[in-house]
Image: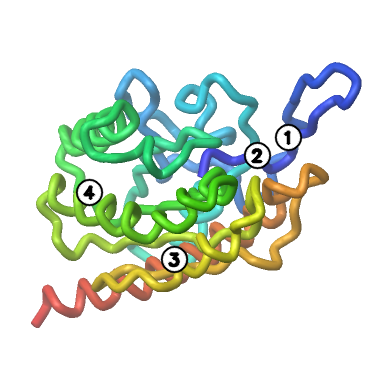
Amino acid sequence: MAGRGGVVEDTATGITTWDGVIPPQCNPKPSILRLNAELEWVEAQEPLHQDIDAKKTNGVGPGMSFANSILNKREGFGVVGLVPCAIGGTNISQWEKGKVLYKHMMKRVKASLNDGGSIRGFLWYQGESDTVNLNDAQSYQTRIHKFFIDVRNDLQSPLLPIIQVALASGQGPYKDIVRQAQQSIDLLNLRTVDALGLPLEPDGLHLTTQAQVNLGQMMADSFLQSDKVEVKALDQ
């Protein structure tokens, strides 16, 4: 989710840089905000995670494309507030309730509600590092299921729409086990978007800029389907 679209590594120096290319589908607009590292709302722009996943080089991710697609397809939606929390290269075990990343995420999410907003959905794209070790891959389904339940419980939103991404790639040989785990989770109002087949950067791991755009649009379509069901339920 942090976004590595357009990020390239100099093979001679090992230094990574972002090419700065922003597709029109990721352009900023006043109705798309992001919660920055200081817990302040600012107009969102790429790289969305520049001050969150601050130890890495960030590029284009699916977030801005997701937000723009929602506003283009749902007239009158209002303001989209994005709360970036991703830390690239992390294992699902690092996101267990009580650990640093989970606490940091929940602090940010709860801070986003201080000005009267509401949480409409939870986007999750993670798991490449869980493909390295067989035990991690085999434990993934149990761990991610508990993680989603913990998030919903802590936010007091038992049917919070969750849009997760099934892996396009992996750091190790057990990608198929993790993908199977992602596609086998049985939770109400959880939808899985499959990234397999989207083009990858030369590193063979991260999605290209255009693939990030496409993924964001796919996630938006999935979210709007979930949101439509939720709105209908509230109206009844």
Q: Which mark is residue 151?
A: 4
Q: What residue type is labelled 3?
A: Ala
Nearer-N-terminus badge (3/1): 1
Q: Name the residue under label 2.
A: 4
Asked if 83 appears above or below 232 in the picture, the reply is above
Q: How crowded is mark 2: few (under 14 residues within 10 Å), some or many (20 or more)?
A: many
Question: Relative to 160, is 200 on the left or the right?
Answer: right
Question: Relative to 211, is 153 on the left or the right?
Answer: left
| Real-space Cα separation, disc 4 to disc 1, in angstroms | 30 Å
Q: Residues within 10 Å of mark 1 (few under 14, many from 20)?
A: many
Q: Nearer the viewer, mark 3 or mark 4?
A: 3
Secondary structure of the residue carrying tag 3 is: helix
Q: Nearer the viewer, mark 4 or mark 1?
A: 4
Camera-nearest residue between 198 and 129: 129
The residue lying furthest to the bottom in this view is 236
Nearer-N-terminus badge (3/4): 4
Q: In which quarter of the image is residue 217?
A: bottom right
Secondary structure of the residue carrying tag 4 is: helix
Identified at 64% across, 66% down, the residue is: 196
Q: Which amino acid does label 4 sit on?
A: Val
Q: How crowded is mark 4: few (under 14 residues within 10 Å), some or many (20 or more)?
A: some
Q: Name the residue under label 1.
A: 7
Q: Evaluate whether residue 45 shows in this view.
A: no
Are the residues flagged by discs 2 and 4 in contact, CB closer than 8 Å? Answer: no
